[in-house]
Image: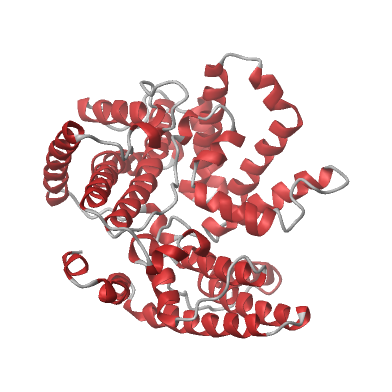
Amino acid sequence: MWVYLLVPKSLKNAVILIGSCLFYAWESPQFVFVILTTTWLDYHFVRQMDKVESPFLRKIWLVFSLSLNLGLLFYFKYCNFFVENLSEMLSEGSGTVTPWIKLALPIGISFYTFESITYVVDVYRKIHKPLRNFWLYQVYIMLFPKLIAGPVIRYHEISEQLTNRIETAELRLYGLYRFIIGLSKKVWIANTMAGYAADIYSHSPDKISTLGAWTGALAYTFQIYFDFSGYSDMAIGIGKMMGFRFPENFNNPYSSLSITEFWKRWHITLGAWMRNYLYIPLGGNQVTPPYRIYVNLMVVFLISGFWHGAEWAFVFWGLYHGFFLIVERLFLLKILQNLPKFVGLFYAFLVVVIGLVFFNLEEIPKSIAFLKIMFGEGKPDAYQSTMDFMFLFYFTLAFLFSFWILLPKGKAIQEVVFSEKYGFKEHVFASFLSFIFLILCAAKITGSDFNPFIYFRF
């Protein structure tokens, strides 16, 4: 970051690109050239597509690019899944299992693949012209704050900022505050909840009490939110320090009164991607007969589940959320609107918690067994983890910051916590708190084990 701040404007993008390559190579050096090669091919495919007028030829170039991106995603992320399932089906008759070399998964491949697709499709739709500079396209794809876990940024949302962004000392301060908020979420809440969740989930369901199962499920629910939203805050903060404006990715999702509202607040940029590049092309709400709307929703959430992981539990998790979205469209939303708000809040949060059991365990039989313990089959004297004072303290923090019970009525979280309208006194107070939080995070990190971000594996 210091190098970026010190170099002249003409060299800033070069510093970003070199730094992003080194950042990615630190974790997956063998895959850096995969990204560089695919982006080089994509760039030229799109340039060729833009040169032709024939709709048929434009589709050919579009197919080339989509095949490249989706082909790589399929190969690295889903080959193991399909080969293993096919092998199991064939082995039922022959008794032999087809050998297959396990493929390593490039971190963040789903995120930068989706961004490549947005660029290609938007040029095809003539929403914007293709870039004339290959290195600018590399900067867009490789930009390190959002490279491996989002937010998923469409090209037109950032196009002007690639060459003409505003950088001020005040914006850098806002970015620093945001980064430290995200770091604190990850280090103090997400990592703490991770320890308790891992402790519970590491035991066989028949050895866990009902209270213990709920403790593990709730701990993981808070872990994944503070882990992922913490990363998003850090990415947005670093981007802001460099003059970039990334879209928000979370807006207090656990305070939702329905699953429909939840998906407007959770992983907002992925939801926007799914809407613009899957749901609308399938016909969206403008289809007849009306039941096709529900088919479209199920297809989108089936793909959303599969995007998160190559396991049947992720597929089920996607369909599970799709099911509740359909039920809400059919009748449930009208019922919830006539009930006290706490009913909708409890319902939506419960649905999310149950779904995340499948998300965490990644195996449907294990998840069902765990849910049975949660809903009454646990033995009172079975294992239930150590619910000490520290757990209760961090659990209370997680609860309060998840639901923002003190948030002014009608205010979005960004308007209150992430405001960019600080006066001198507000800056002094925010700087003081940021300094304290940073010291506390450093102390926590030095005394704990490495705990990677959950969404790095997607």
Horizontally, residue 260 falls left or right of residue 152, namely: right
Residue 22 in view, yes or no:
no
Residue 410, given in percent of the width and then of the height, sits at: 47, 24
Residue 89, given in percent of the width and then of the height, sits at: 68, 67
Q: Quadrant of residue 133?
A: bottom left
Which residue is at 52% across, 45% downward? 358
Residue found at the very far right of the displayed protein? 289
Near-viewer residue (3 or 149): 3
Which residue is at 23% across, 55% downward? 450
Q: Is residue 374 above or below residue 357?
A: above
Horizontally, residue 374 falls left or right of residue 391, namely: right
Near-viewer residue (175 or 283): 175
Near-viewer residue (187 or 450): 187
Q: Is residue 425 above or below residue 132?
A: above
Residue 421, given in percent of the width and then of the height, sits at: 30, 37
Q: Quadrant of residue 47?
A: bottom right
Q: Quadrant of residue 240?
A: bottom left
Position of the N terminus, as image quadrant, is bottom left
